[in-house]
Image (cartoon, rainbow, N blue to C red):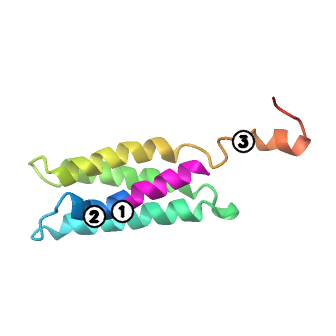
Amino acid sequence: MWPRVAEALLGCWLAVSPFILRHSADNPKLWINDFASATAIMLCAGLSFWRPLRRLHLAQILVALWLLGFGYFASSEPLPALQNNILVAFVLMMFAVIPNEANLPPISWRQNGERVA
């Protein structure tokens, strides 16, 4: 489940980045985007620990695509906040495709009782 922990950490970074990168107070769309995206990332990562929703982490690809598009199209000037959104989007896409139990053998092997060295 380590990929979900990494995604939750990315969500935490996205939530605190407006304070670290000093978003402008006169541009609320940057604040709203970062907090809404961080909430969605942490929610998907957290709910992926529950067995019936174990594939919910794949929904983070949509959040990553949103961040990528927002970072590219939100402003004509290269703001640090938008560059941060693009970087987080790429890292999030890399983690989102990793299965929950990536460090364990496949389920069919575990159910058959086969040992893998």
Horizontally, residue 81 falls left or right of residue 56, namely: left
Q: Are marks 2 and 1 in contact (CB under 8 Å)?
A: yes
Horizontally, residue 93 falls left or right of residue 34, namely: right
Q: Position of residue 75 (x, y in %)?
A: 13, 53
Horizontally, residue 115 falls left or right of residue 100, namely: right
Element carrying mark 2 = helix
Residue drawn 17% across the image and 50% down it? 80
Residue at mark 1: 37
Between 14 and 63, the one lying in front of the other is 14
Q: Which mark is residue 115?
A: none
Element carrying mark 3 = loop
Between 105 and 93, the one lying in front of the other is 105
Range of magenta residues: 1-12
Residue at mark 3: 104
Cα distance between the residues tagged 3 and 1: 30 Å
**Mark sitting earlier along the chain (3/2):** 2
* The C terminus, quarter of image: top right
Q: Position of residue 3 (x, y in %)?
A: 55, 48
Q: Are marks 3 and 2 in contact (CB under 8 Å)?
A: no
Residue at mark 2: 33
Number of other residues with Cα within 10 Å of mark 2, as a class: few under 14, some 14 to 19, many 20 or more: some
| Residue type at numbered disc 2 | Asn
Q: Position of residue 34 (x, y in %)?
A: 29, 63
Residue drawn 42% across the image and 48% down it? 92
